[in-house]
Image (cartoon, rainbow, N blue to C red):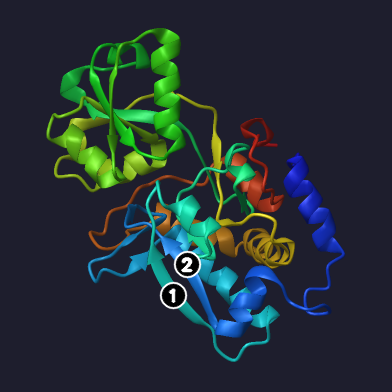
Amino acid sequence: MKRTLVAGAAFAVALSWPAMGQELTGTLKNIKETGTITLGYRDSSIPFSYLDDNQKPVGYAMDICYKIVDAVKKELKLDKLEVKLNPVTSATRIPLMANGTIDLECGSTTNNAEREKQVWFTNTHFLTASRFVSKKASHINSINDLKGKSVVSTSGTTNIKQLNEANAARNLGINIIPAKDHAEAFLMVESDRAVAFVMDDILLASFVASSKDPDAYVISTDAFSKPEPYGIMLRKDDVPFKKVVDAATAALYKSGEGEKIYNKWFMAKIPPKGLNLKVPLGPELKYEFAHPSDSPDPASYKAM
């Protein structure tokens, strides 16, 4: 699989970097000096990162981040490493990463070339596509059926950008409503303030599964995008930290433990309501686990 020029260069440099042989810099230095690492989490991105009934952040991406924390602790030879948790939203996650508030963003963030100008990502842990959910009673079967209607998406996401682009390209005259988070966006469809919610299909599946009447909703087959990679986000230009994070995630996915964590969150009952999303590991992601990559290019993710 191809890497971007930036990420590829970082990886090449990282291979020759003796992390503990030279003076620590950047994120690793800060973690060593403070004895803490800060994880950014989402409150409603089921099953990646969300609050359980005890208001504790849990999820697939959180489990991966804790494996990274273990690797950082081992790399820095720390007896203990305090984990601080900081909430983020679609709009705040990149600024909070850039200004040093968080060290890892554990959620459902799409890795793309545009974002790589501001932040870096580690190896892909999920592949999704941008679709819409609507009520079956609305009989909306395609993107073109959204013409002239009110459609919601979450502020600061690639999804709302794709919705705007499709709206302009197809001259649909859609009234696009920005929501502050995913939960608010789904509620707008639930309460008929919008006919559809455009978001990553797996997140839509989680909202439908946890709704009062799952059978009332349908997720479109029509997509606004090709399969897109999710990655754990970290600060740009921090080569030594990326080396540790990449090694940790690659080892996790290649060992088979990554698939076990996946099945825990996508093929079994999850807290707090015991819902089962029933989304099996697809061939593209299975290949990705065997051959870890941080590529932002959707075309590079193909089942072999």
Say which quarter of the image contains residue 163.
top left
The x and y percentages for residue 118 are 59, 47
Number of residues whose C-alpha sits closer than 10 Å to that of mark 1, classed few (under 14), some (14–19) or many (20 or more): few
Q: Residue sitting at 69 percent across and 48 percent down?
A: 293
Q: From the viewer's perspective, is residue 30 above or below residue 294?
A: below
Q: Residue sitting at 83 percent across and 67 percent down?
A: 17
The circle on residue 84 is: 1
Look at the numbered discs 2 and 1 and tell me whether their residues touch, using CB distance below 8 Å.
Answer: yes
- Left or right of residue 3, residue 65 in this image: left
Q: Amino acid at mark 2?
A: Leu
- Left or right of residue 100, residue 133 in this image: left
Judge whether residue 222 can be spotted in this image. no
Q: Quadrant of the N terminus?
A: top right
Q: From the viewer's perspective, is residue 31 above or below residue 228?
A: below
The x and y percentages for residue 48 are 42, 55
Tell which of 274 and 182 is nearer to you: 182
**Which residue was labeled with disc 2?**
39
